Amino acid sequence: MSKPRVAVHKFSSCDGCQLGILNLEDELLDLVGAIEIAYFLEATSKIQPGPYDVALVEGSVSTPHEKKRIQEIREESGVLIAIGACATSGGIQSLRNFVDHTKLAETVYDHPEYLDYLEKATPVSDHVKVDLEIYGCPVNKYQILEAVISLLQQRTPNLPTHSVCLDCKRNGTVCVMVTQGIPCVGPVTRTGCGAICPANGRGCYGCFGPAPQAELDAMIPLLQAAEEYPNQTEHLLRNFAGYAPAFRDAVDAMLEESPKK
Amino acid sequence: MTKNISIPALARVEGEGALYIRTKDNEIEHIELNIYEPPRFFEGFLQGRYFQEVPDITARICGICPVAYQMSSAKALENAYDVEISQEVYDLRRLLYCAEFIESHVLHMYMLQAPDLLGVDSVIEIAAIAPDVVKKALRSKKLGNDLLKTIGGRSVHPVSTKVGGFYRWPDKDKIKGLIEDFKWGLEFAKETARWAVGLDFPDFEMEYEYVAVSHPDHYAIYDGDVLSSTGKRVPVEDYETLYLESHVPQSTALHSHTTEGNSYFVGPLARYNLNFNQLRPAAKGIANEIGFKPPQHNPYKGLLARAIETIEVYDVALELMEAYDPQGPPHAKFDLKDGEGYGVSEAPRGLLYHRYKVGKDGLIKEAKITPPTAQNYAQMEADLARLAPEVLFDRSHEEASLALEHLLRSYDPCISCSTHFLKLKHERV
């Protein structure tokens, strides 16, 4: 079997997720032996034309050009994998989806009329069919590796779906919320980071997005009771994965019930 | 005759950019470095966020140098709230910054710029010719990432930094456990400098105004004043009296320039030229051995400045790791008040400036971030305008593109510093 041709594409993002591939220092040389890197601007100036067997897409769709380009990429790709919070939920720049974007543009730029962007920054799946999503801000690089290996082995990738909360228990990390009253969204956040925030003595801020079984209705009153500053619950959930439907809807409902302080 | 050259996608930079040049009768008519990084509005949505969220949010501006954003923002907010950090916090922040320099510099030297100097497309091809060198480079890069992970939980967007210090001290045994590997890293950094000086750098020199952070006691990365090669030295709160950003309608991006309207140069070469004398003996010794002494005016040789700086940060990191034994609290206690604060530090690719207005409710009222690539933007265009006539007319399109791309890559432009990089509507006049 010939090596699968892999392309890595960037949309609106910080580059941190595709850097995860270059950060696979121990595996990188074996990886490029098993696949053919056909398009990966951050790593190589050799640009090979499509079609590609696998496309890894980083970033959210936030400009008219990106809206068009994601369609083209979908057409020339076999398996399309969205990597990271931006590609799977819109990412940090989707915070603009909740406010008046013209005011935002005026705040930052002297001449907003020269900007060319979409009102909303949205996940790849809002535009094209996505075959697999890998979450996190940034992604866990080993989940990208697992996805590629699973394709090579023609099996389903093993990507866990439990919450960060469970990882703390497994790691023996004492709960920061129960013992110190620090607001933590670990119980409703997808695993993948290794529960590093509670291990560092702080609450999880939800950068891997909602866990599939997240009980936000139960969690939000607990978070609100523990707030260290007004509206902290909204800040925690309306964050790097704030446009993910579960977080988005929960905060919308919460704000409807109890408007901002 | 009119000839257009267009490099639609720029490879091996972080973020994406493009370059457009229009010529007429072998003269450059128009040159435009076009960054099609979409606007992400960081300074806009920071307004109304709680100050303690800022280091986490600004980290997301750049996945390659998140620590730089965390440091400049934490420092600016500490300045605003009159927070004194302890010596132990100061030392650990310097150590964290060393880790980011190792990761970013090794990445740039071996994976982003060296392929140009060796005439190949990527590090993968270098690995085919010299697998041992690439394996060592990957090990060195990984050591930077290992230290980032030890202090910050993960290497991209670490989670331990807060305004006032750290959420928790990293484990002492884990820090000490890296020392032996870092000794190897220091030796490999020296090996890298000896190897790199033999690379075939293009002849190219320009008159530059260099600007970098400068500290009286050491080679500045984490803190200091803002120093220019014109001799001007100002404290961070006066940065905006000398360096301005403007949104030029006919241009494609925000440009920084001096108040006199000149372009200037930030990054490893600027630091090297301004602060060489403060390098420690290990780095200075190798600089002398390979004959790389300031002043240096060839932007391609930023790679050599990176190589010497990598020795410096390994050396500093080892000292800080040996001494690491925190006894006091990991973060300071302080009261909130209305105020304004300034922070500056050296990202691996150059000076990074932050300013915030804050309230006693802890909320951000105003944010201003000037990333290194915005500051180099005008200089990169000037360099390209100078190089273009030399390569455009007697070389093939492909060769000319490559030469211009290489010049740009030598700046290590972090185009995803997207606070200020954007694609504007194309104006046809």
Image (spheres, grey):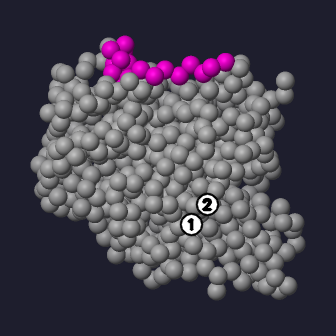
Q: Local crowd at mark 2 within 10 Å, few (<14), some, or many (≥20)?
A: some
Q: Please, what is the three-letter code of the amino acid marked with disc 1?
A: Lys
Q: Chain of mark 2?
A: A
Quadrant (top left/top right/bottom left/bottom right) for the C terminus of chain B:
bottom right
Decide: is A170 above or below B169.
above
Residue B179 percent location from the top left of the image:
47, 26
Residue A241 percent location from the top left of the image:
40, 41
Q: Are marks 1 and 2 in contact (CB under 8 Å)?
A: yes
The residue under label 2 is A65
Between disc 1 and disc 2, the foreground one is: 2
Q: Local crowd at mark 1 within 10 Å, few (<14), some, or many (≥20)?
A: many
Residue at the spot 66% in from the left edge and 50% down from the top edge: A71
- Magenta part of the chain: A155-171
Would you say B51 lies left or right of B338 here? right
Would you say B241 lies left or right of B274 here? left
Residue at the spot 80% in from the left edge and 48% down from the top edge: A49
The residue under label 1 is B423
Q: Please, what is the three-letter code of the amino acid marked with disc 2?
A: His
Would you say A145 lies left or right of B280 here? right
Residue A63 percent location from the top left of the image:
55, 59
Residue A156 on the magenta span: yes
Would you say A105 lies left or right of B378 here? left
